[in-house]
Amino acid sequence: TVCNNKGINNTAVAEAAVLLILACLKNINTGRNAMYDGRQIEVKTASFGVVRELSQCTVGLVGFGDIARETARLLNAFGAKVVYSNRTRYIDAEKTYNAKFVSLDELLEISDFVSLHLAACNDTKEIVNADFISKMKRDAYLINTSRGDLVDNKALYEALITNRIAGAGLDVISPEPVSADNILLDERIKDKLVLMPHIAGITNLTVRKIYVNSYENILKMINGEKPKNIVN
């Protein structure tokens, strides 16, 4: 029997997704660099009337699994409008998480933030390509807490350096470990990228849950009981 730890890091990854959304929304990178460079007043003045609140934004979730739903729940607290696209529509979950089902094209057209919540497979590899990005709003941001393989690095780089989209918040970049010559680490786009080193799902609580869940499943097998999260 093969089992996984499904659901263990839902909250941790959802929190990271919202963190990246807020960091992009509040121009964290620009502000941080300005503080080091002595440009606080310049950036503060430029922010008046420009920086939005999350309650003004539409967040599009590409995929609507457990992590996406937890992300939707957290976004509801901020008053954000949440839409999602998925191969299967979940009407009951829409009511629970206050999320509207739309096509992928409509999601890209209306979303201020496009957040990826997909597994990496042949069907989703580099789903974020030039065509995908061309359908996004010019002031939109891409958020990825799923897998780096979902994104065509070159297409995202071109979109950032030409201002085709406003920016991106990434916990994952392919391939890993990320080398210093990865195109997305180009200094010319660093203000437009909020980066994390693939740690969205790592917290002391998720690590504890992994050990407990695995141990409980071993006990179930020993006792002839059916374990949780069988995948084969």
Image: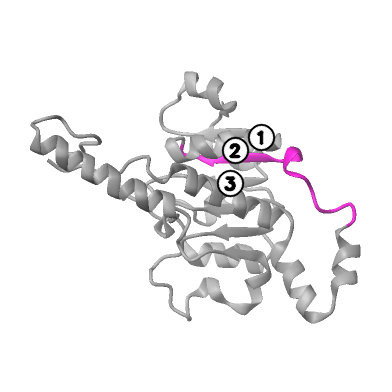
Kind of residue at disc 2 = Leu
Total number of numbered discs in the rendering: 3
- Tags 3 and 2 in contact by the CB under 8 Å rule? no
Residue marked by disc 2: 74
Kind of residue at disc 3 = Val
- Tags 1 and 3 in contact by the CB under 8 Å rule? no
Pick the front one: 22 or 87: 22
In front: label 3 or label 2: 2
In front: label 1 or label 3: 1
Residue 88 lies in quadrant: top left
Residue 49, above or below 104: below
Q: Residues within 10 Å of mark 1 (few under 14, many from 20)?
A: few
Callout 2 secondary element? helix
Question: Looking at the picture, how far across and down is residue 62, in whole percent?
Answer: 50, 41
- Residue 15 covered by magenta stretch: no
Q: Residues within 10 Å of mark 2 (few under 14, many from 20)?
A: some
Question: Looking at the picture, how far across and down is residue 132, in whole percent?
Answer: 53, 50
Residue 68, above or below 197: above
Residue marked by disc 1: 77
Question: Looking at the picture, how far across and down is residue 219, in whole percent?
Answer: 15, 39
- Tags 2 and 1 in contact by the CB under 8 Å rule? yes
Identified at 91% across, 64% down, the residue is 45
